[in-house]
Amino acid sequence: MARLTARRALYAVPVLLVVTFGVFAVAAASPFDPVKAYAGTAALGADQETLDRLRENLGADRPFTARWWDWLTSALGGDFGQSAVMRQPVAEVIGERLLWSTLLCAVAFAAAVLLGTVLGVLAARRPGSLVDRAVTSAAYVLEAAPVFWIALLAVWLFALQLDVLPAGGLTDTGSDRVTFGGLIEHLALPAGVLAVSQLPWFTLYVRQGVGDALAEDPVRGARARGLSERTVLLGHALRSGLLPVLTLIGSRVPELITGALLVETVFSWPGIASATVEAATAVDFPLLAALTTLATAAVLAGNLLADLLYGLIDPRVKLEEM
């Protein structure tokens, strides 16, 4: 396990280098002007000499390769630079928002895995039954539905029509104090929407995996020995059927991050979504590079976690050969 982790960490270095270089290259080709974004409305009445001086102070007049190299060498020392759009160090911007984004993604991912497993098992028990058709039909419908549409529908139903949950934010209007009860209420809708967006994939994978496992000879032998259907399903078929789901965990991380950005935007959740949008539109090189590096590292970590879980659960897989 340690060898696999070290090897993947070594492979991640060139990936992160290419990603950060690409971020600076794409941002340099962007039509957005970082100087005007930094100056805001004051840029409308400023003369060209003032804008050029501000451009020089921000380092925006330098080639993007020089800016990338300066950012990279500073980042290796723990300094991710100063965010021009947020007017504070990049590390502080990420530190203030990462906790809330991590909480949202963790709750939504856990809910999607647990509920998807339950629904997948129920559908796989009797293929072609009413439950199976209802679960698979709902999964295909949700799979095709955009996450922002689900979010807007949830706001309309639960916040506007039923008035049982807040429409967004982390605290109530006029309050800046975060309490446990208030956090649960404000987290319910965004986490629920994000979980629903990931639910179809886990449901369909579990249904297929458990359904195939129920048709295998070892499971048939367990039934022939007189074991109860509950033991056969949970002790044999489910364990074998969950193996493909483990590989799905890593592949769903990019989709989870993308969905979280949209969900946070709709629900005004104080995560990294607003920082990402502002960094992109303002061409905030240091902040944009740090956020992209963080997202890339999360994807690589998700793939590593899926491989480790697969190797630990399936005795046929040897981690040292991966």
Image (cartoon, helix red, strand yellow):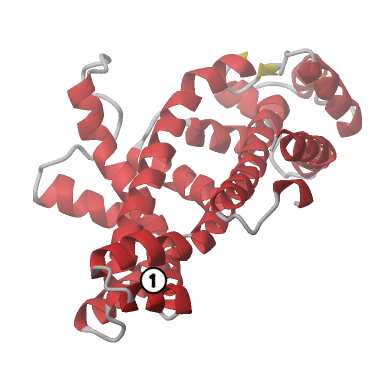
For the point 75% across and 51% down, the residue is 322
Q: Residue at x 10, y 52 (%)?
A: 161
Q: Is residue 108 left or right of residue 181?
A: right
Residue 113 vs 119, above or below: the answer is above
- Give the residue type that dot 1 points to: Arg
Q: Nearer the viewer, residue 209 or 169?
A: 209
Residue 294 image point, x, y percent: 64, 33
Question: In which image quadrant can residue 38 be found?
Answer: top right
Looking at the image, residue 267 sits to the left or right of residue 319; the answer is: left
Instruction: Kindly indicate the quadrant of the structure image that contains residue 283.
Output: top right
Q: Nearer the viewer, residue 305 or 90?
A: 305
Judged from this view, the residue extending furthest toward the bottom is: 128
Left or right of 6 in this view: 218: left
What residue is at 57 percent from the left and 57 percent from the top? 247
Up the image or down, 251 lies above or below 295; here it is below
Q: Determine which residue is flagged by label 1.
A: 207
Q: Position of residue 168 (x, y in %)?
A: 28, 36
Q: How many marks?
A: 1
Which residue occupies 48% across, 43% down? 261
| Residue count near mark 1 (Cα–Cα under 10 Å), binned few <14, some 14–19, many ≥20 | many
Nearer-the-camera pick, 145 or 321: 321
User: Could you say which quadrant of the image residue 188 lies in?
Assistant: top left
- 134 to 250, vertically: above or below: below
Q: Position of residue 156 (x, y in %)?
A: 20, 53
For the N terminus, the quadrant is: top right
Element at badge 1? helix
Q: Is residue 85 visible?
A: yes
